[in-house]
Image (spheres, coloured by chain):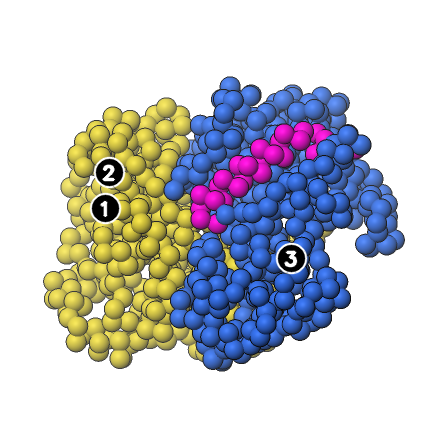
Amino acid sequence: MVDGVRHYDAIVIGAGLSGLVAAGLLAEAGARVYLIAKGGGFLHFTSGCVDVWGDGTPNPRASVTRVSRELPNHPYARAGTESLEKGVAFFSHVMADAGYPFEGSLDRIRLMPTAIGSVRATCLTPATMSAGDLVDTAPTLIAGFSNYRDFYPPYLAANLRRQASINVTGAYLDLPHLHGRKHLLSTDLAHDFGNAQFREEVGRNVRRILGGAERVGFPAVLGGERAQEVSTHLQTLIQSSVFEISTLPPSVPGIRLHTILRRSLTRRRVRVEIGFWTGGRIVGTRAESLVVRSAGHETTYTADCFVLATGGTGGGGIRAFPDGRLQETVFDLPVRGPNDRNAWARAEFLSADPQPYSEIGLGVDARLRPLDRSDRAIENVFVTASNLPGWDPVRERSGEGVALATGWRVAREALDLLGLRSESTPVTARAQS
Amino acid sequence: MSVADFPAFEAHRIELSTDACIKCNVCQSYCPVSNVTDLFPGPKYVGPQAQRLRIGPSVDHSVDYCSGCTVCTRVCPSGVRIAELNSRARAAMVRARGGPSLRDRLIARPELMGQLSRPFAPLVNYTLQNRLFRLALQAVLRIDARSPMPTFSRRSFRAWHRRYPYRSDRKVAYFYACSTEYYEPELGEKAVKVLERNGYQTLLPPQNCCGLPLISNGDYAAARTYAQRNIRRLLPMARAGIPIVATSTSCSLTLKQYYRDLLDIRTEEADLVASNVFDICEFLRILYERGQMNLDFGEVDLEVAYHAPCQLKSHGIGRPALDLMELVPGLLPIEMDAECCGTAGTYGYKREKYDIAMKVGETLFEQIADTGAPVSSCDSETCRWQIEHGTHRPSLHPIEILLQGYEGKA
């Protein structure tokens, strides 16, 4: 008996932001989609905010327009500015429909405190973080939990006082509920915050130390996907504004995005497969199939088009070997970039100049289709985000913006190819509820 | 040349995968057990972190609270075989203690329980429904009195099958598993009928329990004996190119993968058997893809809340049951996204673990209730029993729903 062959309109490889969004857009337009990823998805490691451009300039949209003009190889330039706007609109719709609304605008940065009290420029944040915008200088209390690591309120407050010149103090809550517990992860606390009695205990303890603070910052653990409800309840209990601050992984706001996006996919009958390594096959200039190493035997999937959202060097989409060789891990497409290992990074770890490794990525044509070794475009494969060269999400603070822009753009390209595109599609985005 | 190219690597692939851990914590955030109890610190701590210290005696007894749902292994972006590390660590701990407890020896042998109970099925069932007896069982053996104990069937599936007349040139071998023979013979009967509707005659090669309950309870030595016997018994089918189908996704995963990966049975024979095993829905989906599936379904006006069990997800074959149910006109399967029902085979039956299993299952139970669907569906038997227990509504195997389609009635 030979193995089965499954056929889909589109196969999306990767469960990061660009892959999940591309899959959602495709499914919404009526495509049959299969999404496969070899791990639980990159969103678990992200802040849960939407960074667009954070070099200190006040207007992200204007920065993106400038970057698109000045750096023709930047993914923003390749995707087009319309893509960013539409990608962000789709994302915001899905989140709002799940009861986890995002706030902010492409025309203004938000300055958010980090877990170490530095100031970080982002663009959109979940509403549960909004009150933390440091444009507002209201007196602030930062509250942490005595047996939760990686979040130290006094340290955070001291740093923030220096960096943002606001009146801020930090304190640990020593809650009877948490006595005798194991050392807590953010996910454990998020689970506890799902419980109204726990919230009441937190509320009582915060009231006691509130002083003159007009807002209270917590580590981002205020419940799972129902964080909006949890945070509203806390505001009532404390009688002051409440906001979340992104934490080190496991990052609950990142997990929420993953959960909400993935749920919107299963509701649109996208098959989501997590945990398997794959290899793809290209014949001539067309990708034909993807082989999944299933238990006991292999399963082959075919599709009319493929979205390669495998996350570049950081996400496993591009593998770097000790000898400097770079390999694209699904289709073995040629990788651009320095293949001398010593030339990958500057001597200064946090250099203000671009790191050479940000030039590592796949060569693509104007439609984000990868180029083969003879520079011919693979006609039914589309490349997103970190698989593209010419940008650095860390230095630019542009990770989610690029993921949403390229995710939207490849979905449109794929829908054109499938003949499924309707003009209104991506903007009428609505998650089923 | 990488470490993977050394021959010794293959034999230690699971232990060596520890070194790939980058402490990213994604396994921690997915683990359904550590998310609801402090008794289990979580897969990262018990898996790759404790593994570095396991050179002599067992260092971390909390590994016993791992339910074996396997989500950690699937979500690990670095390829660490966390669930497998935990399973082996538990086996080493059990070995060091001189073997499993009496309870674990008993509940790990559903086949033996079935054989002993069948002649007295009505009496045994009556006794098992008796609250006082269950409390006594809980006191003596620490089997939780609230756990959803299946009832023993008086009928034998094999005996039913002997008299079943359908013959065809196209044949499949059916690994029906203990639950079909001793608890749910009707599921086996329905599977035979669905296969018949597709022109396949079902053969029942001699077989025994797959051994997964023994693996889960840390008794690798006994599991290996079971495994060797199954491989010997199923080999003629595999050699003849007859597909071996199974209605329990946990048993089929054991045959496909655990014999090799956990029990270290790496023979050509074992691999041949493994590559010939198919989940029954996976098999039917292959027929569909080849244009050979019977699509003569009647209308089934039914909403079904479908839960893909953990072990099915570890097959890496997508959602074959959903693919098939979507072929039935009128049928509306809705996929749940909660990771786990909590019971994980025998885990939820244990006195010290019942509450954890129910807490894990809560998310799934709520999701199923929220759909308003009158029935749920799942491919593994203990999960179905747990889901029925937690949702108070029937949970069916996808094959039972397909047969409704063939028989044209809801």
Q: Residue A170 appears at what percent x and percent y?
A: 63, 72
Q: Residue at x 31, y 67 (%)?
A: B349
The residue closer to the viewer here, B240 or B286, is B286
| Chain blue in the figure, letter | A
Q: Residue at x 53, y 52 (%)?
A: A127
| Chain yellow in the figure, letter | B
The mark closer to the camera, 1 or 3, is 3
Q: Residue B51 appears at what percent x and percent y?
A: 59, 68
Tell me the SS state at disc 3: loop
The numbered mark 1 sits on a residue in which chain?
Answer: B
Q: Magenta segment, principal secondary structure? A: helix
Looking at the image, tell me whether mark 2 or mark 1 is earlier in sequence order: 2
Q: Give the amino acid type for the residue marked by disc 2 in the picture.
A: Leu
Q: Which residue is mark 3?
A: A136
Left or right position of A243 against B91:
right
Q: Which residue is mark 1?
A: B374
**Residue A37, image quadrant:** top right
Relative to B225, does residue A50 appear above or below in the rendering?
Answer: above
Tell me the SS state at disc 1: loop
Q: Residue at x 17, y 34 (%)?
A: B409
Q: Give the amino acid type for the residue marked by disc 3 in the picture.
A: Asp
